[in-house]
Image: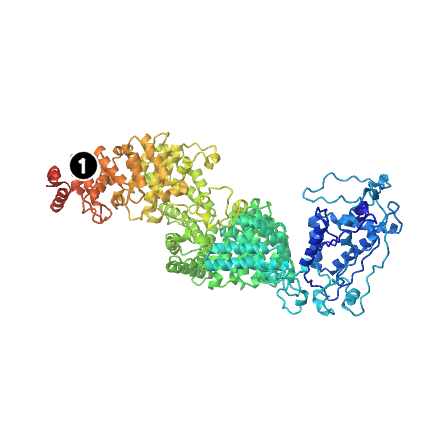
Amino acid sequence: MLLSEIIGSVVERAPTSKPSSSFTPGPSNTGFPQAAHRSKKSAFARARESSNRTLRDDVPFVVPSKPTPLPPLSQGNGDDWRTQISRENELRVSAMSDEEREQERREILERFGPGIKDILKKAREAKERNATYSSAPSELNTHPSASSSVIPANPDSGADPLPPALTLASPAGSRPTSRASRKLRFADVTPNDVHVYESAPSSPRKKALALPAPSPGSDAVSLGKWGGKHPSSQDKDTSEPEPEEGSPEYIRRRFFPSAPAHNSDLAWMDDAPPPPGSSGPPSSTLRFDLSGNPLATTLHSSLPTHLDVDGVQRAGYTLDDIFLIMRMLVGIAHWVGAVHRGVGELRDVVLTAAAGIEAMGERGSLGAHAVEVLWHDDPLVEVEDVELGDKDSSLPLSHLLPQIAELSGPSNSSTSLSHLLAILHRMACQTNDTATKIVSTPSLVPSLFRIFLLAGATTSAADSYSALDLLTALATSTRANAQAIAQPADALLRFVTTLPPPEPSLLTVTLKFYKALAAYGLYSHIASTAHLPFAALAQYVFEHVQNRGLVRAWAGLLEVWIVCATDPHQTTPGHDILWSQVVAWGWGEDLLALRAQLGVSAEDCEVWAAVWRATAAWLEGARINGARSGEKEREECVLAIKTAFESNDGKENTVVRVAMTALSGSLNDFGHGDTSKLRDLGRFAEILMAAIRLWLACLPPTEGPHPSYPFVLPFVQLSELCAKLVTHPVWSQLSSCGSSYVLYRPLAGLLARYLRLSQRLPDVSQDVWMAQALAIISRILPGDEDFAVQVADQIFDLISPQWAASRGIKVPPTFWDKSGLAVIKPFLAHTVRPRDDIYTGPWYITPTSIKCATTQRLPPPSSAFSRDYALPLSRDWTFSPLNHLLRSGTSAVFNNLSSSWDGSEVDVTRAALLLTKICREVSSRFSFVDFVLTREEAIFGCMKVFMLEHGQTHSDTADELMEDLLDRYAVVAASSAPPSDLEQVSMAFLGAHTPFYQFYTDFVALYDAISFSDPTFARLLLPPTSMRYAPDYRRLLWNDFGHILKTIRTSPECVVSGDLSEYLWPVETDPQMLGAYLRALIKIPLEGFLRLVAVHHVASNIWPNLRKNSAELGEERAERLLKAVIDQGSHEVVADILQYSQVRAGNVRVPPACFQIDEDIRATRLEYVRHVGGEALVGQVRGLLQ
């Protein structure tokens, strides 16, 4: 809207009216007078407030010593003061720096929206058009303007006169005094002047402004347009005087017209400071000391400069400077205060990170300092392919990542950019969700490519390496992230095509990045698209084998690409690379020829492993795609490597022997908690694993043992080494070493490959292989779920009717006629992989994994050993089908059963118990005690069986299997294995929020309801009542369900326990439990082991020789118990209490041995009875103690 249209309705005051009091508005940053509103205050009050405000605001301003003189106040018409205001605005803009202009432009756009540009442009064009008619007098208003009257002189002669804009903006100067002075004016409206505006703004978030003027070429019709101007009393020349020749302003205008008018760096060239009475700069340039006192302009030359912000070399601080300092120091203040108070590390991290994130969006040095605050030189543990965990969950990523995306620009320093890369890499390694947020942040990944990988010489090699390492970490996080990053990956060919590379490390990390993409079957087409550069790269690798990292990366990339070509249907998109291309490019021949270039030093061993893996992948692909199942390729490979593996001076033989010796020595030297050696163990295991894989790839595609070997490996030494590894104490630290558990992956991979090797050796029996499989399946980690399912299926197929009969295992024929152990295969497969949406890529990429893998990283330690991941399998994994039966309403396995599956719950229960029994016997026979089911695991598994029998058909076979299983853990067959805890064992099934006591309560109630005194069921009630557990379990059985005690007739020999003393010691001291024992003895005919327990605890609370080590037992309680037993108990109960004795060390004495005491004890107890009750009480028991 044109300015003339805005003031068109302003009617001037009558010339005869008296002028109102002057009004001094505050400074304005916009160049226009502040809005003035009507006030109900009197003229005297307004004058007094104006005077006070003038005194308060009279603070010296810092201005150049020779300011540009402003034109004198115009007393003319309205066009003169509009021209004056426009000129002042132009001078103010020219005096601004580039940063200030940009800041003002952004503030205007944020306040009025992007359309303000067009509005102002149209207003300027209309003003220029109307300028041609400004000389004609207005015909609508002939009254003289009030602005032409003489303004009273200012008493302060040294002060500058008020600007005209401020004078005209006063309320008194714009309000008409009477209605008679008003005139009606009508516009000459034409049809082209009408303009129809929108009913609502185009954007609901855009603030509505005054409606813009119609465009010049539109057909809009205006309802009113005034083309005149205010009459002026006089015309003055408003042109600025030319500066003196040779002055700084003259030089600036002549040679540097685009430079700001007032450059603070050139202030020292000014002649003299401005006079004290002159008007100062706007309030935004006021400077204060740290006490809040304003600094006079005259002090700037004597006080030192405190802070250099945006190149301003002045003393003191502006308000913006003070706010900046506060933001910079808040993180430091929190950190220092936390250190003095001893606050934990987590709080320090949160406070420091909050301060850094808040200030990252600031420009200049503050943003760089914020990056330094957020970045910490704490190098990650050198582990890859694992999520470190959500340690920095307090970071507001939705705010932080866009900040980093904006800061990732060439304007920032190289140090800040390096630290930003480190921050992003740390966050990418935390969790896969965090990596996904990084990839999905707009413009963040493209900025990484543009700044660090495509900028050429402007980026350091270290930053480019870090950026590629970050992209590799993001690609390994999830398949979706890898697909997003693969789109601009063509740009990285610049590191492959330039040979020799200026920075070989960039070539190496680029090949690793391509391998990470190929692990999902992505971007493998680059092998054919850039065939010539990769062929030249192969030749370069042959000539530079001393660069071991490059050789390993090249061989690793070939391995994954060959796997992709093995089954091209699995790549994304399909047929991205073909086996015919692999044959044409001669990758297999290249790998065999590379052997001759490698050495046998310790540093070369890992290179050998990479070459062996790639060669094995080539042979495995030829077995599927080659002629006659790859027979020609196998012969070619065996011919090249057989002598080297079997000869004592062969390179391959030397590498294998060195790796075996080093691995065995490292296992011997490994100490408890020494996780630093895990990396060395993994490196040696990886070499042996690759050698075994190559041996297996050279075998023809047949099943079972093979009569001849492609080449000889030290099989006996490998078997001993793997047997030592699978039972080594190093595995006890797996769940407690944090993210370093990923270093166990090569160890588990070696055991898995050896199991494949053992299956093909002719001198390994089926029982030995099954024992090895049961041990190794409990060591493999997430990512090897497919291998675990394959091994479980092979175990099921091995257990046949003939196999069971030959080993004396009695199984009804109907069990085999129906489905046998195959009925539980779906349940075990779901147990191994409980979530279908998580597929971790294996250590060795397979054609199946490149299609199905959702991530290439192991889960964080907090999730790896939870319900979401079953590997490594626990010892009670054979009971897992019962878990699905107990949760049949929520278990997903029932929704995925095939139509041919026709098993029942009884069949599943019987198969699970049979498998558990066989696995326990096989592992025990070959002394794999670490993998034998513990007593508590067997007890809890059998408890789950009885929990299933409610409403189910009774199965004699299941009862026999359970009874036989529990007999292995009875007292008579107890082993020296350390006892476990039922509460801990049950947590894997019940979860952390369901206590075992709740399960036991339901179990006892079920026994009371449907057991019919089943002896096996009764045996399972006793273990939680031992003194190892809380008294609540004993109260539940002896108090709440005391009426079922008479049905429990378990003998001491049949108690499922390693030592009966855990039920007897320490002596029971709970009064409620002592009352329950006494009540049961007096009122219930207890039998078997329960009677022994009750007699023991009651007698131990009476006789001094049994309670001599229990100072907490009182004498008064003993006397009351003795009197109650003698007065209320039967003859048999009294005799048992008086004659009971027990030993604390050694085997527990059971009836009748525990009721045989010598004469000295008899005499002592008779004397004690006399002490408690006198001769009257002695007379009642004399016959029992003599």
Determine which quarter of the picture holds residue 1007. top left
From the viewer's perspective, tell me whether residue 548 is left or right of residue 500: left
Q: Is residue 577 something one can see in this rendering? A: no
The residue under the point 73% across, 68% down is: 270
Q: Position of residue 684 (x, y in %)?
A: 44, 58
Residue at 81%, 69% in the rendered image:
245
Identity of the amino acid at label 1? Val
Indicate the position of residue 688 as horizontal and vertical percent values: 44, 56
Q: Is residue 364 above or below residue 879?
A: below
Q: Is residue 1138 left or right of residue 416?
A: left
- Counting from the top left corner in percent of width and height, residue 463 is at 59, 60
Quadrant location, the C terminus? top left
Q: Nearer the viewer, residue 231 or 501?
A: 231
Is 1183 left, or right, of 352 in this rendering?
Answer: left
> In this orientation, which residue lies closer to the viewer: 655 or 889?
889
Q: Nearer the viewer, residue 231 or 204?
A: 231
Tell me if residue 1038 can be seen.
yes
Q: Residues within 10 Å of mark 1 (few under 14, many from 20)?
A: some
Color scheme of the displayed model:
rainbow
Total residue callouts: 1
Tell me which corner region of the image, top left, top right, bottom left or bottom right, holds residue 903: top left
Residue sitting nearer the eye, 294 or 1083: 294
- To which residue does mark 1 refer? 1133
To which quarter of the image does residue 74 belong? bottom right
Q: x, y (%) of residue 774? A: 38, 46
In the rendered image, the vertical position of residue 522 relative to residue 950, given as above or below: below
Question: Which element type, helix, strand or loop, lies under badge 1?
Answer: helix
